[in-house]
Structure formats: structure tokens, C-alpha cells
Amino acid sequence: MRLAGLALFIFVGLSAGGVRPSRANDIFSVTLKASDQAGKPVADACFHWTLVQTGPADQEDFDLCTNDSGGVTVNYGTGFVSVTLTISQSSAPPGCSGGFMSPQTYDLTSGGDREIDVHFTCVTGGPAPGRPPGKVKPPGSADFVPITPGQILPQGTIVDVSGGAGVALTGLTVTQSVFYGDRDRVPSLFVIGPTVTGAARTAAARAAAGVVELRLTGGAFGRCKARSLQSSKPRPVRRLWGKGKGKFRTRGRYAAAAVRGTWWLTADYCNRTLVSVNTGVVAVTDLVKRKTVLVRAGQSYTALAPKKKHR
């Protein structure tokens, strides 16, 4: 079973003649607290707990997740020959990594209250200095609301920085980048995508580890045919500016740009994706041609839509 935010009572009757390291049926608690890199509580960190007692022998297994305060508490009884608790992490909170990399075992035979701290590194965001705060719509939410400082952004969160708004994002490497839109009618929305995880056995894999993908979304692509007839210099359907450091990758329809400490633009047009670099270097992956090129300051790269096959 999966429970969240409960104080779970686990205690079994005493055996006759059993060793009693503390008073029979004393009740103590184990509290697990999860927090992010800024020390803020983290909800939905899930763990498998195994409580083993001898004298008499008994074992309890249960699954618990941290609540909105970042905590979960288990109460246990004493008076047994031995009491041990093993905690294994089932899943990290959405948008976070870290925590217990291996099962942790605690000897509770002597009783006493215990507090266990678990630390995660999470994708967080807040308002960008000098700009109106961007708006966010986390998964399961119906409306956009202004972003708040240090807000955890789970995968699937939609961020809107249209009209000159901005957000400052901190990735899993605890470095920050600012993402913003221009003060015009071109939408600037993106979705917090997946984070690259797993074993990094090669240099390329190590460079990619911890990269958070920001996927451009929105825009009226249905009007593309009309736009192409009306203007020889069309505006983008959607765009996103990025500036700063950190392991982020902006992904348009036909290209993705991985930041290396820079200032860059990702813009989707009807038939192409443009990546333009103001400062620094960006690694651009052409999603159509399946190749990666380095684009330096003052340069740009255009990834064209695939050609339509004629029957």
C-alpha cells in the first residue's frame, strides 16, 4: 500500500521471557524528512519500509510518501530482542534527483525517537530579476498562476513567459539560467521535460547527465499557410530566449539547443526552427538530419522541416 502524510503505528505483542531493552510497549517514532538543495520540504518522495522484529519474530512491509511538509512518521513499539528498520527509496519527487541511492538500515532495539534527513536536488524556479514573473501550470492544475521563489517544477509543468515575462530556473547542477519572452504577441511557453539520468560511462553521457529539457509549446501552427502567403518575412510561431549557465536544453519542432553558458534564442517558424546565439556557445541538434553542430556568438543555425514525400 502507498500512504502519504500519516503516522503509522507498528507494534506487536511481547513474548514471554523476551529481552526488553526498554519498557514493554513503549512507543517511539521514526520521522523521515525530505528537502531540496535550498532546505525546502519536498513532497511525494516515496519509500519502502521494512520493520523486522525478533522475540517474537515479525516483519512488516509498507510504502509511504512524504507529505506537503516533506515528512512522514512511523511509530513503533519496543520490548523485543531486536528491532531493525530498512528504508529503500521507491521514487524521487517529480523534478528531483538524489535521495537514498541504496537501502538504509537502522537498529531501533534500544528505542528512542529518530529523525532521518533525505536530501534531493530539484528543478526549481522563481521570478527573473527586472521582469514580470512568468506563470506556471503544474501537472493536474487547471489555471496558470505566477511563479513563486524556489518553486519546485515537476516534469510536465507548463511555463508561460510571453509578453516580456521571465523565470529563473535552477537545474539539477544547482546553476541558474533565465528564460524569457519578448514584449510582443509571439507566445513564449515551454514544458518542463524529462531529465537525462542513468549511468554516465562515456564523456558524452557525462555531459548529458542531469540536462533538463524545456520543450517549446503553444503557437498557432494552423495559420501557417495563410501566413506564408501574407508575408515574405514572417514572425515566429513561438519563441524562447535563454541566458545563463546550467544544464538546460531548449527544444523546438526541428532542433534542440543545449546551453554551455550563453545567451541564445530558440524560435519555431512554420517550416523551420532557428537557433541564434548572442554570446557563448550552443550545441544545436538538428532533429531532422540527426546531427549536432556548435553554434558560436553571432551565428545561427536553421533546421528545416522534413520534405514532404510526393506520391
Image (cartoon, helix red, strand yellow):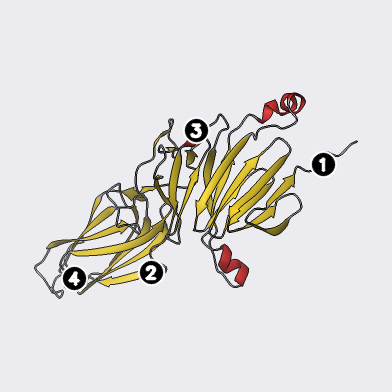
Q: CA distance from mark 4 to mark 3?
A: 65 Å
Q: CA distance from mark 1 to mark 3?
A: 33 Å
The quadrant the C terminus occupies is top right
Earlier sequence position, callout 2 versus callout 3: 2
Q: Are marks 2 and 3 in contact (CB under 8 Å)?
A: no
Q: Secondary structure at mark 1?
A: loop
Mark 4 neighbour class, 10 Å CA radius: few under 14, some 14 to 19, many 20 or more: many
Q: Are marks 2 and 1 in contact (CB under 8 Å)?
A: no
Mark 1 neighbour class, 10 Å CA radius: few under 14, some 14 to 19, many 20 or more: few
> What residue is pinned by disc 4?
80
Task: Give the residue type that dot 3 points to.
Answer: Gly
Q: Secondary structure at mark 3?
A: helix
Residue 205: x and y in percent read 60, 67
Earlier sequence position, callout 2 versus callout 4: 4
> Toward the viewer: 307 or 55?
307
> What residue is pinned by disc 2?
103
Asked if residue 234 is positioned above or below residue 156 in the image, the reply reads above
> Toward the viewer: 193 or 259?
259
Task: Give the residue type that dot 1 points to.
Answer: Lys
Foreground mark, 4 or 1, reads 1
Q: CA distance from mark 2 to mark 3?
A: 48 Å
Residue 77: x and y in percent read 17, 62
The numbered disc on residue 307 is 1
Q: CA distance from mark 2 to mark 1?
A: 52 Å
Q: Residue at x 35, y 42 (%)?
A: 148
> Toward the viewer: 273 or 155?
273
The numbered disc on residue 163 is 3
